[in-house]
Image (cartoon, rainbow, N blue to C red):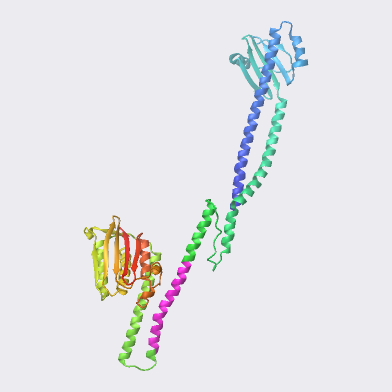
Amino acid sequence: MKIRNKLTFQFTGIVFCILVLFSLCLYYAFSQYREFNFRKRLREKALNTAKILIEVEEINSELLKKLRRNYLQSLHEEYVRIYDKNDNLVYKDDTIKFKIPDDKLQKIRDDKKYSFKLKDRQFVGLDYKGTYVITASAIDIEGSKANNFLAIALVAGNLFGLIVIFFSGRFFSSRALSPISEIIHEVDNIKEGHTGLRLTKRKGKDEITQLANSFNQMFDRIEDTFEQQNKFIAHASHELRTPLTSITSEIEVALLKDRSTEDYKETLRSILEESLSLTELSNKLLELLQADKQSLISEKVNLRYLLDRLEEDVLKRKYSKSFLIENNINKDLSEIEITGNEDLIRVALMNVIENGFKYSDEPVKLIVDEKEADNISFTVIDEGSGIDKDELTKILKPFYRSHRNISASGFGIGLSLTNKIIKLHGGTLRINSVISNGTSVTLTFPI
């Protein structure tokens, strides 16, 4: 069932229940008021009759009956009866065959005023000066007709109100959900290949505006992901094509004619070099993809152990320049632990250190510092050619390489991978560079 129909039925049901409850309360209140007013009239008639009969000496029973029949009676089957203290009937002006039970007469004497109903007939009783009991009775025909008319009017009004409520609810639910229908229509028009399209911007702070903004933000992320995937595929294809083309060319040249053993060895060395380059590129691509998908498994990494492993990794690569570690922390490094994944932290640091060796002819320095109580910073400094300011943000994108260092070996993946690892750890990466004076890259990890 559509939300519009659900809202319509829910709105109709709730309002109709309220309307029915109000009608029942109104009917009950009217019935109680009508009954109260009718008994009040009976009580007044009973009291007036008693006063005339008992207190006016010129009026006897027969004369009072004539007066009541000609001038005072106005209710349906109305009668007034007066009993003495021995329950003897001293006045009666009706022919109705009905005897009031003795217990009711006693109740009237006890309570002084008492009202009750037997079948359709209403009764009121009064104790008059402790000597007489006056009772008056009648059938409220007009009141019953008024009750029935009110009941019919309320039922008809409720049925008519149900129709009005239903169509009103349908109208307002359609108006309330029309922005959602517009969003659905706009989303349906955003087809594959039209990633630049966005939902219409709406003003206000309501939920529909928040939904539209959330959709636009989602489309921005999707478009950014598509662009990154397309660039990744294009760059990866280009980078893979170069060593593969070189390997193919070397093999084709070697097969053109017979060559000496030394020539074949030279060809194999060239092929091996390209193969190693291809292997390195594949490993970098794999690390980049894993960094995108990996969920961080945190552990406590000992800082002293981490630095020792970094020195070992640098020595294994046999760089021609020296590597210096400067410790600016005034306590035992073995007592400090970093929260994160050791392998990923080493990959991030080695990528930056490797760039320092790659783009500088001078020694590379790693400065370890504790600038704040809750994080450790690693700053890698080289004295290379530097990076232009407009390229400082671009070099964090996969496969981007500074035009100043385009001749150096590499694939432009290292810093992008490092940036992803830093974000995964909740740290920060900051790059400062001065042309011809070198570059410093600071990686901060939480403790």
| Magenta-drawn stretch, dominant element (helix, strand or loop) | helix
Question: In this view of the protein, which residue sits in the foreground, 54 or 384?
Answer: 384
Residue shown at the point (33%, 82%) measured from the top left:
272
Q: How many labels does the image show?
A: 0
Residue shown at the point (26%, 68%) measured from the top left:
365
State the quadrant of the C terminus: bottom left
Which x, y percent locates residue 351?
Answer: 33, 69
Question: In this view of the protein, which residue sits in the foreground, 293 or 306?
Answer: 306
Position of 343 with respect to 167 (left or right) is left
Residue shown at the point (58%, 63%) measured from the top left:
189
- Regarding residue 101, the answer to whether it shows in the image is no
Which x, y percent locates residue 336?
Answer: 25, 58
Position of 208 with respect to 135 (left or right) is left
Question: In this view of the protein, which residue sits in the foreground, 159 or 326?
Answer: 326
Where residue 418 sits, quadrant-wise, is bottom left
- Regarding residue 108, the answer to whether it shows in the image is yes
Which x, y percent locates residue 61?
Answer: 74, 9
Residue 246 lies in the magenta-colored region: yes
Task: Report the span colored magenta.
Answer: 225-252
Which x, y percent locates residue 397?
Answer: 41, 69
From this view, report whether residue 265 is shown above or below residue 337: below
